[in-house]
Amino acid sequence: MSIDRIRNYILENSRKEAEQIIKTAEERFRVQVEKTKLSLEKQYQEMLHNEEERLKEDTKRTLITLKREYKMKLLEAKNSAIANVLARATERILSLPDKNYLTLIGKWLANIPNHLEGELFVNARDLKRITDAFMDTVNKDRKAKISLSASAVDIKGGFTLKTEHYEIDYTLDTILQNLRTMLVPKLGDILRLSDIEFEAITNEKAKNNK
């Protein structure tokens, strides 16, 4: 075999071997690329899922916080409204002219069962303006007499009636407290939002906070 043929044979074999090496390398590269793509895609999906879960938790926490804030504000509004109503009622009663105030006291005394005998206790101011004529009017249609105590008690207004066995509390503080008990559920119904209204408000606020 001549030198040229030998050289050509070696070159041809080398070329084929090189082509095979390149082909194998390309195949391995393609496989590696596919594996890398799959791995990156998996990582991306995991990151996306984790981010979505984080956002869900953040949104959930935000909504819980907003609901708590709205409930506190509603409670504050309710307490403020009730306090204002009671303060105005107290002021109005205490500023009544003597005649109107005694008319009110007379109406409250009319609620006392007429078979009960007792002693009426009022504050120092009322002790001065409750006359014998007023007490005569109170006792006019009663079976049992109510007498006015000469001792004043420390109350804003109204009275307490001490009977033989118990005491009837018609003080202004107690009457207003009873009024507060009536107002709380009524005002709660007025201020209470439906679930749909509440979700709409909190979702909108959560959106604006982003």
Image (tube, rainbow, N blue to C red):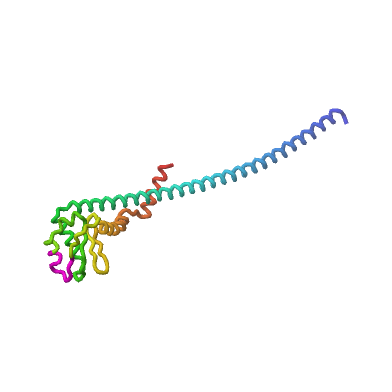
- Which percent across, then down, holds residue 182? 28, 59
Query: Does 22 sit left or right of 136 as displayed?
Result: right
Q: Nearer the viewer, residue 105 or 7?
A: 105
Residue sitting farthest toward the left: 133
Residue range corresponding to the magenta coloring:
136-146
Q: In terms of depth relative to the viewer, which is nearer, 105 or 162?
A: 162
Tell me if residue 10 comes above or below residue 139 in the rendering: above
Up the image or down, 171 lies above or below 28; here it is below
Image side of residue 71 versus residue 22, left or right:
left
Measuring 88% from the left and 31% from the top, which residue is drawn there?
Answer: 1
Quarter residue 143 falls in? bottom left
Where, by quadrant of the figure, is residue 205 drawn? top left
Picture residue at 13% right of the left edge, 56% below the top: 99
The answer to which of 10 and 66 lies nearer the viewer is 66
Is residue 156 found left or right of 65 in the rendered image? left
Q: Position of residue 3 (x, y in %)?
A: 86, 28
